[in-house]
Amino acid sequence: MFYYISFLRPPPLQASIAPSEPILITPQICNDLRTEYFQEPADIYYSWSLESPNQPTPVITKPVKLTSWRSNNAYKEISVPRPQNLRGGQSWRLILSCGMTRKDQIIALDEQNIGSTPLAVVSMPVTFISRPQKGTKQEQITRSYFLRASLQQSPVIFDIVEQTSFDLDKKIWDSGIGLSSWLVQLYAGKLEATVLLSDLRESLFSRDNRNIVELGAGTGVVAITLGILRSKLDISGQTGHIVTTDLPSAIPILESNIASSRAFTSRIPPEAAVLDWESKELTSQVQLDTGLDAIIMADVTYNTSSFPALIGTLSRLIEFSKSKRNGRQPMILLGYKERHVDERSLWERVKEINVHFEKVGEAKGAGGNPVEVWVG
């Protein structure tokens, strides 16, 4: 299980440049569904990051302790000091972290102990002006992800935007982060070499043409991580496709996150597409000429009533791919965190379509149920 710093009360979109007017926020540390508070005391530090598109390196103030989190003060309003040497018209993002270094402000996907401490959060820009408009509430947050696939390759920092609302398809879930981190480990060759993982690595990270479809993409962190990793390969000829799918309501934020990471996925950018599991027809974007090499899913099991539709979609994807690949099935990769034991009925039910899952790894996070990684 991972815990996330978030804003119960976010900073405003506009704030007065006058230091006499407080900037009030209410930070919280919760699980991904915001149903469990982090029970350990934790110091929260704040920094300000200047919005400056022409700046080659970000201007980020030194982290300073803001408060000590305890679950019994989860609704406490706190005043955040403004950036020093503030000028009117500037826009700054507020960063909250549980440490005093830049490393604490980002989520390092290449760390094996990812999520052992609460994950940092970044606000949308706060514009400082003399007469701010009242009631301009922020409705999105950002989290920054660090990825270094190997010591020989340049590191990448990319951002994923989430909604602050409770829309489940517009926020980060544990399995998305856990599976993304595991993919980095697989790419870097840090996992135990088995026949199954060798086959999966060939399906995902071969230098040949590869077609990969993701189900239930949400904010797109898994597909973007995969796109960054495949873009680092020395691929000659056709690169293949990464098609990341969800319901129509998820597409705007999914496309926005894909666009913001384009500098790192320019060779193999993920493609967002609508795929409704209830539909009996596959969308044209997933019907790729050479079939599918892999299907990826993260946190698709929380609603057991959707299992028939999910299994039906998997069956259609598998049968389509077999028709293009001389009967060969695509490999299936699943990131899963147990929320109810009934979810595990999926493992038995997919045997009906000749999918047999084997557990190959996990990400423990800060305790509680880990993110499990399964391959079928």
Image (cartoon, rainbow, N blue to C red):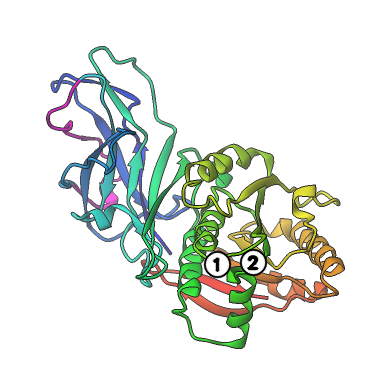
Query: Which residue is at a point 31% across and 59% down the rendered structure image?
Result: 39
| Label 1 Cα crowd, 10 Å radius (few <14 / some 14-19 / many 20+) | some
Secondary structure mainly formed by the magenta segment: loop
The quadrant holding residue 188 is bottom left
- With respect to residue 108, does 281 lie above or below? above
Numbered marks: total: 2
In the rendered structure, which segment of residues is drawn in magenta?
67-87
Q: Are discs 2 and 1 less than 8 Å apart at CB?
A: yes
- State the image coordinates of residue 55 (x, y, percent, origin top left): 28, 37
- State the image coordinates of residue 255 (x, y, percent, origin top left): 58, 41
The amino acid on which the numbered mark 2 sits, given as a three-letter code, is Glu
- With respect to residue 361, does 96 lie above or below? above
The amino acid on which the numbered mark 1 sits, given as a three-letter code, is Glu
- State the image coordinates of residue 187 (x, y, percent, origin top left): 50, 72
Q: Secondary structure under badge 1? A: loop
Give the quarter of the figure containing the C terminus: bottom right
Numbered mark located on residue 343 in the image: 2
Give the quarter of the figure containing the N terminus: bottom left
Q: Secondary structure under badge 2? A: helix
Query: Which residue is at a point 38% across and 69% down the rendered structure image?
Result: 367
Query: Which residue is at a point 15% across and 47% down the rendered structure image?
Result: 65
Numbered mark located on residue 338 in the image: 1
Q: Is residue 73 magenta?
A: yes
